[in-house]
Amino acid sequence: MPAFSLAPALSILAAFRRVSPVRPLHTFLRTTEERLNPRRLVVHEPVDTRSQSAVLVRTDAGLHQRATILCESGHGRVPTIVLGGFVPDGPEQVFLLRRFFRRTGDLYYFNYPHQGFSLDLACAQLDDLVSELTVQGQPPVIFAVSFGAGLALDWLRRTRLAGRCATLAGLVLVSPVACVDDLIAPGTVKPATLLGRAFKPYLTTGAVSEATIEKSRAIFTRMFEAGAQNKETLRTLMTAPEMRQLHGAVMATIRGITTTGARERVQAMQAMIAPTAYFSQALLPLTEAPVLILFAEREDAVLDSASPTRFALESAHRAYFPFGRVHRVNALPGGSPVQHASLIFHVFEFLPYLGSFYSKLRSTKLKSAA
């Protein structure tokens, strides 16, 4: 018997979101489907580990720095790989979008380790997973958020440097942060943004104090709690048990990242190259797959006004991605402003762009299979 699915109904409801108060009904249908088909996350053991093995041999990266890849089975043949930001972990990053993604194919989450991080190893894991899925005839969509978008861009840059072209069905970059300069302008004594001020102490050569770590935890907690303040809006997005589950998972991640883990994530961002630095015919375009780039209307709360990544992708995105589109995601009438990477609290604002993008991918897949 086929699995019960309310996805078609949810799609119709999303399409009429601007003219009909469908959010409570959307939540009811989604949670009903969740009860009938509860989430089943399994650890994905890679078939091909050649890239990872090479990194472990030639660098000082260790197995403790390897991301855990979790998988949920989907209903199509276009899988999605989720690369989250610094926090939360992948499953929480797309908490309200999981069933949307699973309409198109399997869903893979990169959960970064709490006790360490290696940019080389993360790129190698991504390389192996994309290769594995491509060999299976299922090139994936990479859905990358904030810091995860920086990881995706750096992986694409490295792939081109190696003389290869990544085989992807598509790429989505949400509020991309691809280098430290996106958060803190060079030479800045006091960063303009709250997140920039949290990162500044990590950029010194000395040890990072426990007080600095606690301050970082407090800032990320404040950012999450700020989005959760509007209780009326939250009631239209998720149930009370879901909110408790989400809050607990996000807080556990924030508390669980160790001093070494936090420092190595920042070091990874320091090692990333700003897109403006490789504006060259030798490397561009990064991919000819369809690309969707989404900036929130209130990016200035996180991104520095001189962010090189935002400048490059807004002013010259076709040089990097010939089949790319850039959109600014604004609040619905009467809603609160859309914040950086706010996929949980502004899911209805992001859905139209994502729905259109994935609809075209599904249509292309069906045509190629015919």
Image: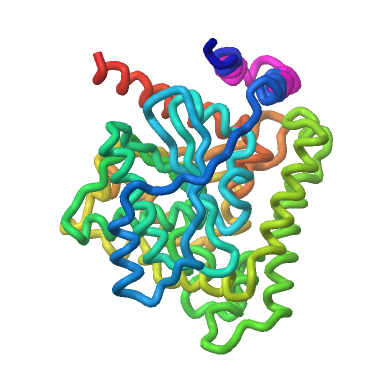
For the point 59% across and 14% down, which residue is it? Answer: 4
Q: Is residue 202 above or below residue 268?
A: below
Residue 277 in percent (x, y) is at 30, 66
Task: Looking at the picture, tell me which residue is in the foreground, 274 or 365.
Answer: 365
Residue drawn at point x = 76 percent, y = 36 percent:
242
Disc tally is 0
Q: Quadrant of the C terminus?
A: top left
Q: Is residue 323 visible?
A: no
Q: Residue furthest top?
A: 1
Rendered residue at 57%/39% (across/down): 41
Residue found at x 63% / y 38%: 95
5, above or below 295, in the image: above
Estimate the x, y position of residue 62 in percent, counting from the top left: 44, 71
Q: What segment carries the magenta color?
A: 10-28
Q: Is residue 240 magenta?
A: no
The answer to which of 351 and 181 lies nearer the viewer is 351
Q: Is residue 229 visible?
A: yes
Q: Position of residue 39 (x, y in %)?
A: 62, 32
Between 36 and 86, the one nearer to me in the picture: 36
